[in-house]
């Protein structure tokens, strides 16, 4: 029987380490859970720690994975459907190779069909399911592979895939809601900028000619607007290139650690949307950690992987710091509280889960709570954004119109002066 090294914590946070025999890691984890212990780490006594490393590398950059999926022509909806069908067919007792053959024949996505055929062939050649999926990181990210590997080790692959399906569905819904809330003002501002550009290059020159013929004395706002119009019309290509360079410079700054931290901090503090972004991050972090723990991945390794899924450098650094303190003997709730980045609701539910031995369940409740909060925030923003954007567009257009018509108030006097 295999021998495992373990590190567990009791309800008071006291750590204990040792060795124990079990049929596999999943059985040993279940044994400790029944005793009311939290599993911090577990690995083969004579192994090289591959299981732990696989878990700690479970999640790459979520947004980068999404872009790879988009470029590959395989979207998240396809992965969700595949995972759900796979879980149902495995639960029905069908052989994995037969399932993959059937799903490859049914899918309408030609690229995904080739991927499934490749995975099937790898399994037929003796590879594990997780390793076969890992050969296609542009389709199946590290989270997906890690959860499948944990399901294979524990012998509960159908159950784990069911959990993964729910997670992917909720992730897709959450992402869609947040994007929808942010997309509306972005579109409105883009339209407003387009209208301003047309007014600057088409309307302003007409008023400029009228005022020039009238020999009118122009106020400062009008002179500034005419100067900007002339600059844009004369150097349209340069202005466009400057805008492109600005976008490139901003993107390049985001690739640096300092730039990413500043931008992510700004996202958390921006009016109206900062609270929405933080709630979405909390929902994703809690949901992912709960999925990993339910899949049998030890707590420390799960925390390390979750630190890569937050999508925000500030929260990621807080999770890394919390994991380090947990290694020194701290409880999850205490270490999360010390970072100052996690709401009291998350800390309280985590503390309850630690004390009662139901941490995955409490994390699921926290995720559900913040998903509902995101729904409420999106509904509120949908109500507030429309009048706010109307005011913003009115202010932009009104400022230009005001600057254009301001000289008219003195134009009559200027004309009378010209007649004399």
Image (cartoon, helix red, strand yellow):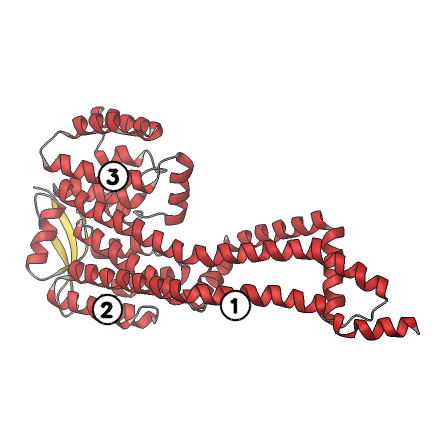
Q: Say few, some or many: other residues with alpha carbon within 10 Å of mark 1 (under 14 / 14 to 19 / 20 or more).
A: few
The kind of secondary structure element at disc 3 is: helix
| Residue at x 24% of width, y 50% of height | 167
Check whether the beta carbons of the residues at disc 1 and disc 2 lie within 8 A of each other. Answer: no
Tag 1 residue: 391
The numbered disc on residue 233 is: none
Q: Residues within 10 Å of mark 2 (few under 14, many from 20)?
A: many
Q: Which mark is residue 81?
A: 3
Q: Where is mark 2, residue-wise? A: 333
Q: Upstream in the sequence, badge 2 or badge 3?
A: 3
On the image, which quarter does residue 232 sit in?
Answer: bottom right
The local crowd at label 3, few if under 14, some if 14 to 19, many if 20 or more residues have their Cα within 10 Å, is: some
Q: Is residue 187 above or below residue 116?
A: below
Q: Position of residue 402 (x, y in %)?
A: 67, 69
Secondary element under disc 1, as helix, strand or loop, is helix
Give the residue displayed 11% in from the left and 38% down from the top: 91
Closest to the observer, 327 or 272: 272
Observer-side mark, 1 or 2, equals: 1
- Residue in the image at 17% along x and 26% along y: 98
- 381 horizontally vs 95: left or right: right
Q: Report if the CB atoms under discs 2 and 3 are less than 8 Å apart.
A: no
Q: Quadrant of the N terminus?
A: top left
**Seen from this angle, which residue lies furthest right?**
420
Point out residue 139 in the picture as x, y percentages from the top left corner: 34, 37
**Spot occupied by residue 109 in the image (x, y as percentages of width and height):** 33, 30
**Which of disc 2 and disc 1 is earlier in sequence?**
2
Q: Nearer the viewer, residue 276 or 289?
A: 276
Residue 212 image position (x, y, % from top left): 83, 62
Instruction: Choose the circle earlier in sequence order: 1 or 3.
Output: 3
Up-down relation of residue 302 to residue 387 (above or below): above
Gap in Å between the C-alphas at discs 1 and 2? 44 Å
Asked whether residue 329 is in view, the answer is: no
């Amino acid at each position: 029987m295999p021998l495992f090294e373990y590190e567990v914590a009791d309800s008071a946070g006291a750590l204990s380490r040792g060795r124990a025999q079990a049929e596999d890691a999943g059985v040993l984890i279940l044994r400790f859970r029944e005793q009311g212990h939290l599993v911090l780490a577990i690995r083969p006594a004579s192994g090289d720690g591959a299981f732990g490393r696989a878990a700690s590398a479970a999640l790459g950059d979520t947004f980068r994975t999404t872009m790879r999926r988009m470029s590959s022509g395989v979207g998240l909806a396809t992965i969700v459907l595949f995972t759900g069908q796979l879980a149902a067919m495995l639960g029905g007792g069908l052989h994995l190779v037969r399932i993959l053959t059937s799903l490859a024949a049914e899918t309408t996505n030609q690229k995904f069909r080739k991927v499934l055929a490749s995975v099937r062939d790898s399994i037929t050649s003796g590879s594990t399911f997780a390793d076969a999926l890992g050969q296609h990181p542009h389709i199946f990210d590290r989270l997906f592979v890690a959860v499948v590997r944990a399901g294979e080790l524990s012998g509960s692959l159908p159950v784990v895939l069911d959990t993964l399906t729910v997670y992917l569905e909720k992730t897709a819904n959450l992402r869609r809601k947040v994007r929808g809330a942010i997309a509306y003002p972005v579109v409105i501002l883009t339209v407003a900028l387009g209208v301003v550009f047309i007014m600057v290059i088409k309307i302003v020159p007409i008023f400029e000619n009228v005022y020039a013929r009238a020999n009118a004395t122009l106020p400062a706002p009008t002179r500034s607007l005419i100067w900007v119009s002339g600059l844009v019309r004369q150097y349209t290509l340069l202005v466009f290139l400057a805008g492109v360079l600005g976008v490139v410079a901003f993107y390049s700054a985001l690739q640096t650690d300092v730039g990413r931290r500043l931008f992510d901090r700004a996202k958390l503090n921006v009016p109206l949307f900062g609270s929405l972004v933080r709630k979405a991050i909390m929902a994703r972090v809690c949901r992912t950690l709960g999925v990993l723990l339910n899949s049998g991945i030890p707590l420390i390794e799960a925390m390390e992987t979750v630190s890569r899924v937050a999508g925000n450098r500030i929260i990621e650094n807080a999770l890394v710091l919390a994991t380090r303190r947990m290694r020194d003997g701290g409880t999850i709730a205490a270490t999360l509280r010390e970072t100052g980045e996690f709401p009291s609701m998350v800390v309280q539910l985590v503390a309850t889960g630690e004390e009662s031995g139901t941490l995955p369940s409490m994390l699921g409740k926290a995720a559900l709570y913040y998903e509902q909060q995101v729904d409420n925030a999106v509904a509120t923003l949908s109500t507030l954004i429309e009048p706010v954007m109307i005011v913003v567009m009115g202010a932009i257009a009104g400022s230009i119109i005001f600057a254009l018509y301001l000289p008219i108030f003195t134009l009559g006097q200027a004309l009378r002066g010209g007649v004399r």
